[in-house]
Image (tube, grey):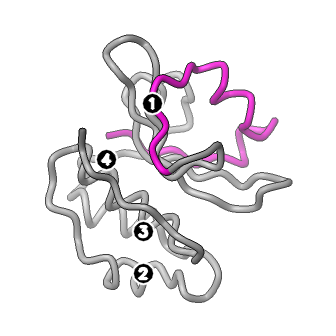
Amino acid sequence: MKEFLSQGQDSSCVAVAIVNACIYAGRKPPHMEDLITDLKCKHGGAIGEDTVIDEVFEGRMRKTDCFDEFMEEGGILTINHPIFNFHAICVFPQDDGQFTLVNSWLGPNVLKNIGREEIERFLPKYQSQLSMWTC
């Protein structure tokens, strides 16, 4: 099993998601401190994630508005949730139709064998509260 990075108790969820997406894709991840600085995570959230993701993945990861496409390919999901606030996770499809969630709110850092229904259940009601980048 791949060793994914855990966030801890700070506001670096987008940086952690970028590193974990790199690990999943077999790419060398950038240094965490550089990502935290580039995304301005120390100020309570991420700024400019579109640009940073594009630079890190050299244009190979693309932003999508289609949840079905995202679920087919997996990638980084940022959620502006009315209860849980802003958070970024990785969702990776498994060969058996289930998913692996990394850095989720639902439990340990890596959750395997999660169904699409469970993922949809904790997402906000409105698509405009989601941002998705596919691997």
Helix, strand or loop at label 2? It is helix
The three-letter code of the residue at mark 2 reads: Ile
Q: Are marks 2 and 3 in contact (CB under 8 Å)?
A: yes
Specify whether residue 73 is painted magenta: no
Helix, strand or loop at label 1? It is strand
Is residue 104 shown left or right of residue 29?
A: right
Q: Which residue is mark 4?
A: 61
Q: Which residue is mark 2?
A: 36
Q: Which span of residues is magenta-colored? A: 109-135
The three-letter code of the residue at mark 1 reads: Lys
- The mark nearer the N terminus, 2 or 3, is 3
Q: Which residue is mark 3?
A: 15
Specify whether residue 127 is painted magenta: yes
Q: Nearer the viewer, residue 47 or 19?
A: 19
Establish if 1 lies above or below 40. Answer: above
- The mark nearer the N terminus, 1 or 3, is 3
What residue is at 46 percent from the left and 78 percent from the top?
39
